[in-house]
Amino acid sequence: MIWKEVDIVSWMDKTNEKIQANKSELTILDRNIGDGDHGINMSRGFQKIVDQLQETNYSSVSAVLKDVAMLMIRHIGGASGPLYGTAFLRLSLATENIQTIDTTTLAKGFHAATAGIKQRGKAKSGEKTLIDVWSPVTKYMNDTEEINPTKLVQVAELAMENTEDMLAKKGRAAYLKERSIGHIDPGAMSSYLLFQSLAEVLEGGSTT
Amino acid sequence: MEKIMNHPETIVNDMIDAMVLAHPNSLRRIDNQMIIARKEQPKGKVCIISGGGSGHEPAHGGYVGKGMLDAAVLGEVFTSPTVEQIYTAIKELDNGAGVCLIVKNYTGDRLNFDMATELATAEGIKVEQVIVNDDVSLDDDEDTSGRRGIAGVIFVHKIAGAKAEQGASLQEVKEIAQKAVQSVRSIGFATSSCRIPAATEPNFTLEENEMELGIGIHGERGITRQKMGSAKSIAQQLVKAILDDMLLEKEAEIALMINGMGATTKMELYLLYKEVSELLTDRDINICQSFVGEYMTSLEMGGASVTILKLDEELKALLNATSEAASFIVR
């Protein structure tokens, strides 16, 4: 599909709905291995994001993504704000000055976004962070001929579930050492919701 | 336990107004920002800015005042302040002499303070960061998030603040703050959990006869769970953990802080103080200064932390220098 401003707005709307619906689930996950505020921060931040997007007219996909990034950094707070914000800034840069943004362009953008999260968080795969969802999803997007929305969700879901058995090396969960094993990473879950929403937009196809 | 509030979403905002209202001669709020600053900002002095999530009161606003912090940037409960808030504080406070940020080693704080530093530096403001990581319950490992910053940060605030008040340069302030970081160690334990105002459940639950050892300051679980011991046995465990990590020769001089996590009575804190100080005195360690009370809390968590700062003449003088910060007055 060809991505337009409205598709990004729709992606954020769908993500927000899922974040709000799973607010307490995210908070419970964070309570298990963190400080119990992930659901609260994500729901506050995403509500601000969709409110702002509604009020603004954008002239490019890149501009929407940039605004999303700045709103994330400003309103989510904690570690998630800068990490998600960095990812969306990279997505924005990857789509800047490109007339027709197809899914391949976006996949490349996700590659840059994942690299951005790794750099900002000084983290790599296998450390029980959101990277463990972003990395496999990005790999699927870039390796496949045509992105299949159902498959995309499956990859993201499996990646999220795989964080359960991991020993946390980064973020607050790392303080628990072995006791971090047996819990899904809350950042992995919010990332899953983001990609699940992306798949729904893909499924719906281009808006005309 | 019920919380006194009007609305969980406005609790931090309301608290900032309240602190300024309670200390009108020493504090001010910057516009409507989440920033508590010194009322009178001296010219030509290096600014010391700290901050972090809320829920640690009196940290961080209580340490703002002449001789200590110039400003505290406050995030939501247990959530780092945002890049924008930190950047605003740096821009508002800097008067050309530079800004020293005192940051506790948590992923959220590090990311937000880093990005704010990058933005301010790009604008030509001199900014240095000092990272506090005093919690000995975690490994000082570069492959992980490393050690947390806990109550030891209060001593770093005091020493950096006193040095800046003397008119030292940004580099000098940074160096003495780093010396303080290298000289301070802490460890904490919890006897009960806490609940974030916007949440419905506590972060974890402990049975009546249990405690969590090696906790941080965010209601998070500790390193291990164990049976609750006597004041004496807890003190032995905490002192051992610190001394295993820090070289204190005979006749070494230290400052000792027993910090309550929020729900522990002062009676218990003093009891713990006695046990800890006896263990140290037995090893011929000289306690020059003692602090017993709530300095860095974790909402209404039960428990305490022990902090030892190894002193030399310079650190001792800076710790003794006058401070007008509401929660750390030195006359």
Image: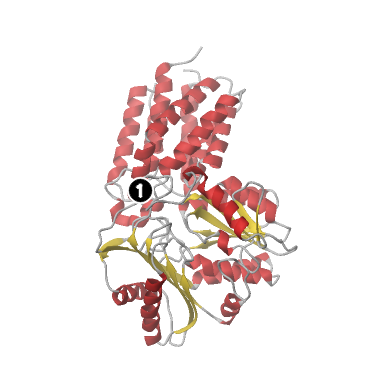
Q: Is B121 or B88 nearer to us in this picture?
A: B88
Seen at 48% across and 30% down, the residue is A108
B4 to A76, vertically: above or below: below
Report the number of discs: 1
Q: Is B149 or B17 nearer to us in this picture?
A: B17
B161 to B320, vertically: above or below: above
Q: Position of residue A192 (x, y in %)?
A: 37, 34
Q: Secondary structure at mark 1?
A: helix
Q: Position of residue B92 (x, y in %)?
A: 69, 52
B184 to A111, vertically: above or below: below
Q: Is residue B62 left or right of residue A31?
A: right
State the image quarter where residue A141 is shown. Answer: top left
The reply to whether residue B245 is in sight is no
Q: Position of residue B223 (x, y in %)?
A: 32, 60
Report the amino acid beneath label 1: Arg
Q: Is residue B206 left or right of residue B12?
A: left
Q: Is residue A99 left or right of residue B122?
A: left
Seen at 24% across and 64% down, the residue is B209
Q: Chain of mark 1?
A: A
Label 1: which residue?
A31
The reply to whether residue B208 is in sight is yes
